[in-house]
Image (cartoon, rainbow, N blue to C red):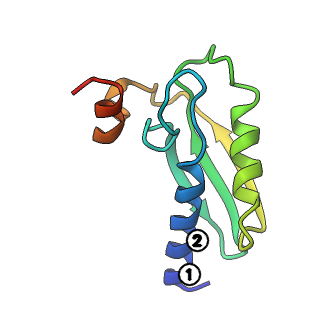
Amino acid sequence: MTQDDAQNLGDKIVEVLKTIYDPEIPVDIYELGLIYDVMVSDENDVKILMTLTSPNCPVAETLPVEVEEKVKTLEEVNNAEVEITFDPTWTQEMMSEEAKLELGFL
């Protein structure tokens, strides 16, 4: 996989992530700042490091599965795995300007 291919696949993954919304907040998980890292191997295996707004988030069980399933729908993706971390802890500062505007924080 060339650097361009990896970048293009990374962009496609981000587009998919932008279709997944936190059920309690009308903003997608990418703009919310819940995605910490997207890693793509030479074999097109994808690992996504993400967090939740809180450890007690009601979608803690379902959201990571939804992320994996949607990313796996990309033709180029061989496999996808989501790892949840709370280090660093999510804060409102991690939201994009767009998300802050949408939620009335700006």
Q: Kindly give the residue lying farthest to the left in the view shown.
A: 106
Tell me the residue at 60%/26% (across/down).
23
Query: Foreground: 87 or 17?
Result: 17
Please determine whether, in this image, residue 77 is positioned above or below residue 58. Answer: below
Please determine whether, in this image, residue 18 is positioned above or below residue 93. Answer: below
**Amino acid type of the residue that numbered disc 2 sits on in the rendered structure:** Leu
Q: CA distance from mark 2 to mark 1?
A: 6 Å
Q: Is residue 52 left or right of residue 60?
A: left
Where the C terminus falls, by quadrant? top left
Q: Position of residue 69 (x, y in %)?
A: 77, 50
* Location of residue 1 (image quadrant): bottom right
Tell me the residue at 54%/58% (across/down).
15
Q: Is residue 57 left or right of residue 74?
A: left
Residue 96 visible, this orientation: no
Dot 1 lies on which element? helix
Which residue was labeled with disc 2? 9
